[in-house]
Image: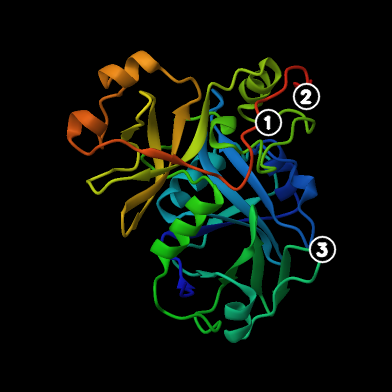
């Protein structure tokens, strides 16, 4: 796969002496774990526990960088600014000034003049250019740079990158699916994207209660879909009658591969009747697009265990 620009991704920067404690009160993961050689995956959720955005945090020398979809960067900045109050933290949207590039392996990274992080780490920085192993798929790398001459091809590789995300089972939230799912529905508890011992943060009560009760009835699955006009945020139907909401899509020769949040409970009656759709885009049998087939993920969908989560109070 070719390496190059990821124009669909943007960058926020959190700078100032209170950046870590501020993010600690807003994000699902323990931001204190973000060290000079370590990146962090986290969700930013509403007070109702619904994920507004997924952030990949990088420990850049100029402040904490957060990589997220460009279309959510400004709205996320504006929402977080409302909670700054007296905290000494500045939140900047660097999406138009910085570049985010993707490299599918170490050979491609080195060919562009960048060295991967050293063994046992997931981040390194040289002259302001950050190189990060992708959380959940450490064989791929981001290069995040304030300079356009950082040895990065101008070619966009968005499609290949999103397909690789799907195959790695890495969730993404876009405008069409923002504030739709609790973090565990996106498998973030299986991808080290949630801390259940850090204490309070926005949405924490719902996320902790979901884990504590062990009632995760929907999970993100990987699907194969036939050719059709599938939409992010739309619904795909499976042959067993279950339906799921699409959160990531990429075309392949046989149709599409996708990630979707799907009920874990199969409905034989629904399969026979072809029901279970939610009336959104990509309407399975009702829309004439056919049904999806579940594909394996590279990790197990372990259910939440009751009693292993703390409310942090």
Q: Is residue 277 above or below residue 194?
A: above
Callout 3: SS: loop
Residue beneath disc 3:
120
Q: Give the left or right position of residue 68, taking residue 237 as reference.
A: right
What is the number of the mark on residue 201? 1
State the residue at coordinates (53%, 21%): 217
State the residue at coordinates (65%, 70%): 130
Q: Give the left or right position of residue 163, taking residue 285 as reference.
A: right
Tag 1 near tag 2, CB within 8 Å:
yes
Mark 3 or mark 1: which is in front? 3
Q: Is residue 270 above or below residue 95?
A: above
Q: CA distance from mark 3 to mark 1?
A: 29 Å
Q: Decide if residue 179 is in sight here.
A: no
Q: Give the left or right position of residue 95, taking residue 270 as reference.
A: right
State the residue at coordinates (35%, 30%): 239
Residue beneath disc 2:
312
Tag 3 near tag 1, CB within 8 Å:
no
Local crowd at mark 2 within 10 Å, few (<14), some, or many (≥20)? some
Residue 40 at x, y = what percent? Answer: 69, 51
State the residue at coordinates (19%, 28%): 286
Q: Is residue 161 above or below residue 192?
A: below
Q: Decide if residue 273 is in sight here.
A: yes
Task: Out of 264 and 308, give the one closest to the viewer.
Answer: 264
Dot 1 or dot 2: first in sequence order is 1
Callout 1: SS: loop
Local crowd at mark 1 within 10 Å, few (<14), some, or many (≥20)? many
């Amino acid at each position: 796969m070719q390496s190059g620009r990821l124009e669909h991704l943007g960058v926020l920067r959190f700078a100032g002496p209170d950046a870590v404690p501020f993010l600690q009160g807003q994000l699902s993961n323990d931001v204190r774990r973000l060290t000079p050689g370590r990146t962090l995956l986290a969700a930013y959720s509403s007070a109702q526990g619904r994920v507004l955005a997924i952030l990949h945090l990088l420990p850049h020398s100029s402040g904490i960088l957060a990589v997220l979809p460009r279309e959510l960067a400004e709205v996320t900045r504006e929402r977080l600014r409302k909670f700054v109050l007296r905290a000494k933290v500045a939140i900047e949207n660097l999406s138009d000034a910085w570049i985010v590039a993707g490299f599918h392996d170490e050979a491609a990274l080195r060919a562009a003049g960048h060295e991967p992080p050293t063994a046992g780490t997931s981040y390194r920085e040289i002259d302001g250019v950050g190189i990060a192993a992708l959380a959940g798929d450490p064989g791929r790398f981001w290069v995040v740079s304030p300079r356009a001459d950082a040895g990065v091809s101008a070619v966009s590789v968005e499609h290949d990158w999103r397909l690789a995300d799907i195959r790695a089972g890495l969730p993404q939230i876009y405008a069409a699916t923002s504030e739709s799912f609790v973090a565990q529905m996106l498998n973030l508890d299986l991808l080290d994207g949630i801390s259940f011992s850090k204490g309070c943060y926005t949405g924490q009560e719902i996320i902790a209660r979901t884990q504590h009760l062990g009632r995760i009835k929907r999970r993100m699955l990987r699907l194969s879909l036939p050719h059709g006009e599938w939409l992010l945020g739309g619904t795909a139907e499976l042959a067993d009658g279950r339906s799921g909401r699409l959160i990531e899509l990429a075309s392949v020769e046989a149709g599409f591969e996708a990630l979707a949040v799907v009920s874990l409970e199969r409905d034989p009656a629904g399969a026979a009747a072809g029901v279970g759709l939610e009336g959104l885009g990509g309407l399975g049998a009702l829309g004439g697009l056919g049904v999806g087939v579940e594909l394996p993920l590279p990790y197990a969908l372990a259910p939440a265990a009751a009693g292993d989560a703390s409310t942090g109070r």
